[in-house]
Image (cartoon, rainbow, N blue to C red):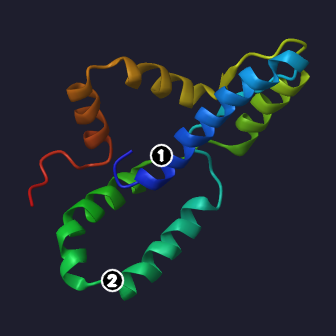
Amino acid sequence: MPLLGALSASKARLEAMSNALRLELAAWKIPVVVIEPGTTETEIFARAGAAADAAMQHADQERIGLYQAHLAAYEKAMDRFKPGPVDKVAEVIVRAVEARRPKRRYAVAEARTLGAILPKLPAGLRDRVLAGAVGLNGIKP
């Protein structure tokens, strides 16, 4: 996701690690499952916002100016966006844990739709969809 590169990278790394562990532990019949929760209503957004605000206080104002339009568009888009409830994620986790033969991947309904469609789109279209979703279409430096 735009402006969430570090978070996206950490999730991709976790998924890659899980895929490797699944193969490594298969000999012992130890399942490794990836849960795709999607965006969930947790404290991470408030904490990240507070950390970003603190970082902005110490950042070079000229550099901040380069991203001002991006940040404003992203903030406006996020005001319209509502994360999903935690209980939906908990239900998926319980289903995975209780499964006799767990799937390799489980997704909360909201994540399933976006996660299934976006990777199949041509790169240019995917970029436009994501940029539009967070209000970055049409921003010029």
* Quarter of the image with the N terminus in it: top left
- Residue hosting label 1: 8
In this rendering, would 61 be left or right of 40?
left
Check contact, mark 2 vs mark 1: CB within 8 A. Answer: no
**Can see residue 48?**
yes
* Quarter of the image with the C terminus in it: bottom left
**Can see residue 82?**
no
CA gap, disc 2 to disc 1? 23 Å
Which residue appears at 75% of the width and 28% of the height?
A: 92
Query: Which residue occupies the foreground of this view, 47 or 31?
Result: 31
Circle 1: residue type: Ser
In this rendering, would 56 be left or right of 14?
left
Q: Position of residue 113 (x, y in %)?
A: 50, 23
Badge 1 local density, few (<14 within 10 Å), some, or many (20+)? Answer: few
Query: Which residue occupies the foreground of this view, 43 or 15?
Result: 15
Tell me the element at label 2: loop
Which residue appears at 32% of the width and 56% of the height?
A: 74
- Residue hosting label 2: 59
- Depicted 29 relative to depicted 60: above or below: above
In this rendering, would 83 be left or right of 68?
right
Asked where in the image residue 62 lies, by quadrant, the reply is bottom left
Q: Position of residue 134 (x, y in %)?
A: 32, 47
Q: Earlier in the sequence, mark 2 or mark 1?
A: 1
Which residue appears at 58% of the width and 69% of the height?
A: 47
In this rendering, would 6 be left or right of 60?
right
Asked where in the image residue 118 lies, by quadrant, the reply is top left
Query: Which residue occupies the foreground of this view, 127 or 84?
Result: 127
Tell me the element at label 1: helix
Q: Position of residue 64 (x, y in %)?
A: 25, 76
Query: Which residue occupies the foreground of this view, 48 or 7?
Result: 7
Circle 2: residue type: Ala
Q: Which residue is at the far left?
A: 140
